Image (cartoon, rainbow, N blue to C red):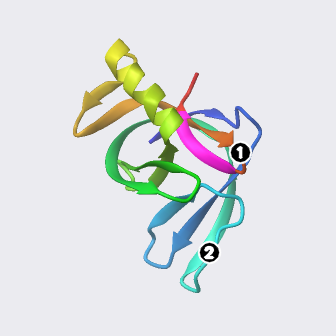
């Protein structure tokens, strides 16, 4: 992951950092933190990365996909609407499919009460 711009939307994001060093992006504002985790707050940013599909989820009011950064292993959530944009960008050639993932420029967006990963504009 290579940062290319700082805080484009002036949002504060959160991530859980576990004792084993693994990191998880929090896609909601008030995450539950277990005793082996600590919560970090950081500024939104734009970054270049290859994101590898990990899994999908379906909640009561949302659905999306989980991606892992090929370089750092950090996990991010992308909601369905942003996944649609990602697939259209692949078809148009704006995002490349390589090394088992999607290579492009990404940032985070607020969607309702939650945050989602998406393509940078």
Q: Give the numbered dot on residue 22.
A: none
Crowding near the residue tagged with mark 1, few <14, some 14–19, many ≥20 C-alpha atoms within 10 Å? few
In the depicted structure, whether residue 93 falls above or below residue 60: above
Real-space CA distance between mark 1 and mark 2, rounded to the nearest whole angstrom:
25 Å
**What segment carries the magenta color?**
114-118
Locate residue 34, reporting x and y percent: 58, 82
Marks 1/2 in contact by CB < 8 Å: the verdict is: no
Q: Is residue 87 left or right of residue 9?
A: left
Residue located at (32% from left, 46% from top): 53
Q: Mark 2 or mark 1, which is nearer the start of the sequence? A: 2
Which residue is under mark 1? 112
Q: Which quarter of the figure has residue 8? A: top right
Q: Nearer the viewer, residue 90 or 50?
A: 90
The residue indicated by pointer 2 is 38
Q: 13 or 4: nearer the eye?
A: 13
Magenta span main SS: strand
């Amino acid at each position: 992951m290579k940062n290319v711009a700082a805080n484009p939307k002036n949002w504060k994001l959160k991530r859980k950092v576990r004792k084993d060093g693994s990191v998880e992006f929090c896609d909601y504002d008030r995450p539950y933190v277990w005793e082996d985790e600590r919560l970090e707050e950081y500024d939104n940013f734009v970054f270049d990365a290859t994101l590898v599909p990990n899994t999908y989820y379906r909640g009561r009011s949302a659905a999306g996909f989980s991606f892992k950064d090929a370089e750092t292993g950090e996990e991010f959530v992308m909601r369905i609407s942003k996944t649609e944009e990602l697939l259209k960008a692949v078809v148009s050639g704006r995002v490349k499919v390589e090394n088992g993932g999607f290579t492009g420029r990404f940032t985070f967006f607020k969607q309702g009460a939650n945050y989602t990963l998406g393509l940078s504009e």
